[in-house]
Image (cartoon, rainbow, N blue to C red):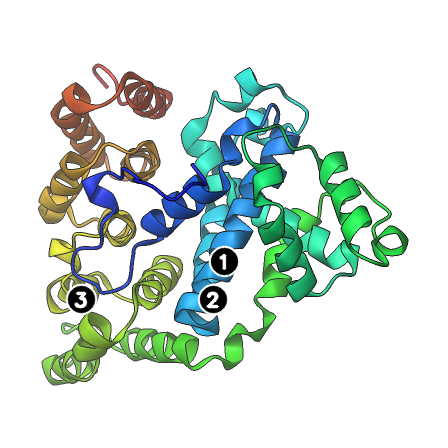
């Protein structure tokens, strides 16, 4: 870690059908270089260490792929955090800042999704310190060797800022932000996204689908659907970056104006049903479940069997059991998926999925 050498990564981290590296790949490289996220002894320390890694990843992405890609990544992270925050239990260790390392590690999947707030924390530190982005970057990059492989507390980092950055003592008065910073920090950083062409291109395609009506209703037309597919498929499949595709799927998950049959047409036209990227598939699976596409359960099976990461399994099973509350058939689907994937899962992943199923009454007879 932190030295020029061999970095071993799982095959799933390598990009398959896109030229740019996946977010996971870039994250692992940054983690290996910094080497600080596993040193946290409490939630409060994890906010800083993981937040610094996410900040460095954000800046590396901005340098490598441009401002638009970095802003798209921020938007995707904010959406993930917002959804996880809504689902998090009030008693979750992830929401108790002072809990010890044991409690902090109890909800790994939940923490992985909620870690996006850690980036908000670093944005807050940057704002409070009064430093320019260039000076803050120089401080972080110059002190990588100092930060590696040792516990890093908020006070320690504040002292480092005050020692190295002129004027920081006058600006940074608080050691810890007010609670609203978690929800305000990321949106503040995303204010400029409405003027970025890459965002507008995605929103334009979504709007075209939202204007379509089902074929069996007045105004519905197969010709109109075909025109939208012909105009947009080349952009989604070839011209868009991975971040644009993920942003599109996030928007699609949030809208109620796209009908089920059109969602299914997208799966075929844009290749979502046969995608190999896990971040694309986890969103696509949630869309299939939300639109009650029971004839596409094979997509969920293939995806869950292709990897064993907790955050993906937890996300898919949560969608399935939530849908099972209104459509009983999905409870049987949840049991079927559980029987299929359970033998190949790590015990910690098994336990996480079991708790989701058991809480929703999907274990045993019902």
Depicted 305 relative to depicted 182: above or below: above
Please tell me which of labels 3 and 2 falls first in the chain: 2
Q: Residue 266, which numbered label? A: 3
Q: Residue 15, which numbered label? A: none
Q: Position of residue 348 (x, y in %)?
A: 33, 19
Q: CA distance from mark 3 to mark 1?
A: 30 Å
The residue at 90%/55% (across/down) is: 170
Residues at discs 1 and 2 in contact (Cβ within 8 Å):
yes
For the residue labelled by badge 2, is the local secondary structure a helix, a strand or a loop?
helix
Image quadrant where residue 76 sits: bottom left
- Label 3 Cα neighbours within 10 Å, binned few <14 / some 14-19 / many ≥20: some
Q: Position of residue 139 (x, y in %)?
A: 66, 53
Please tell me which of labels 3 and 1 falls first in the chain: 1
The residue at 13%/63% (across/down) is: 271
- Label 1 Cα neighbours within 10 Å, binned few <14 / some 14-19 / many ≥20: many
Query: Which quadrant does the C terminus fall into?
Result: top left
For the residue labelled by badge 1, is the local secondary structure a helix, a strand or a loop?
helix
Q: Nearer the viewer, residue 325 or 38?
A: 38
Depicted 324 relative to depicted 18: above or below: above
Q: Residue furthest right?
A: 170
* Residue identified by numbered label 1: 58
- Label 2 Cα neighbours within 10 Å, binned few <14 / some 14-19 / many ≥20: some
* Residue identified by numbered label 2: 62
Q: CA distance from mark 1 to mark 2?
A: 6 Å
Image quadrant where residue 128 sits: bottom right
Q: Position of residue 153 (x, y in %)?
A: 69, 32
For the residue labelled by badge 3, is the local secondary structure a helix, a strand or a loop?
helix
Q: Is residue 92 visible?
A: no
Q: Is residue 31 visible?
A: yes
Q: Position of residue 50 (x, y in %)?
A: 54, 40
């Amino acid at each position: 870690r932190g030295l020029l050498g061999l970095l071993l990564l799982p095959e799933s981290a390598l990009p398959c059908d896109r030229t740019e590296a996946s977010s996971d790949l870039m994250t692992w490289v940054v983690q290996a270089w910094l080497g600080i996220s596993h040193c946290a002894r409490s939630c409060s320390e994890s906010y800083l260490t993981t937040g610094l890694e996410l900040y460095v990843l954000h800046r590396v992405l901005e340098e490598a792929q441009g401002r638009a890609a970095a802003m798209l990544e921020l938007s995707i992270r904010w959406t993930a955090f917002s959804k996880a925050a809504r689902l998090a239990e009030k008693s979750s260790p992830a929401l108790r800042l002072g809990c010890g390392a044991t409690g902090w590690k109890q909800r790994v999947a939940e923490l992985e999704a909620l870690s996006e707030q850690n980036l908000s924390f670093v944005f807050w530190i940057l704002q409070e310190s009064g430093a320019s982005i260039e000076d803050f970057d120089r401080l972080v990059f110059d002190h990588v060797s100092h930060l590696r492989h040792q516990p890093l507390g908020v006070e320690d980092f504040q002292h480092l800022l005050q020692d190295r950055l002129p004027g920081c003592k006058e600006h940074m008065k608080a050691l810890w932000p007010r609670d609203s910073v978690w929800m305000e920090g990321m949106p503040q950083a995303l204010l400029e996204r409405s003027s970025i062409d890459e965002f507008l291109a995605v929103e334009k395609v979504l709007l075209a689908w939202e204007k379509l009506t089902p074929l069996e209703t007045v105004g519905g037309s197969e010709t109109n659907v075909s025109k939208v597919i012909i105009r947009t498929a080349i952009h989604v499949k070839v011209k868009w970056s991975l971040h644009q595709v993920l942003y599109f799927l996030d928007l699609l998950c949030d809208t109620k104006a796209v009908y089920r049959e059109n969602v299914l047409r997208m799966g075929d036209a844009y290749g979502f049903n046969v995608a190999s990227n896990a971040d694309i598939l986890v969103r696509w699976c949630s869309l299939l479940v939300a639109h009650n596409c029971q004839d596409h359960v094979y997509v969920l099976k293939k995806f869950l069997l292709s990897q064993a990461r907790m955050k993906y399994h937890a996300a898919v099973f949560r969608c399935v059991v939530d849908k099972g509350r209104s459509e009983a058939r999905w409870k049987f689907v949840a049991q079927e998926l559980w029987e299929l994937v359970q033998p190949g899962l790590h015990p910690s992943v098994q336990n996480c999925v079991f708790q989701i199923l058991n809480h929703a009454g999907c274990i045993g007879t019902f």
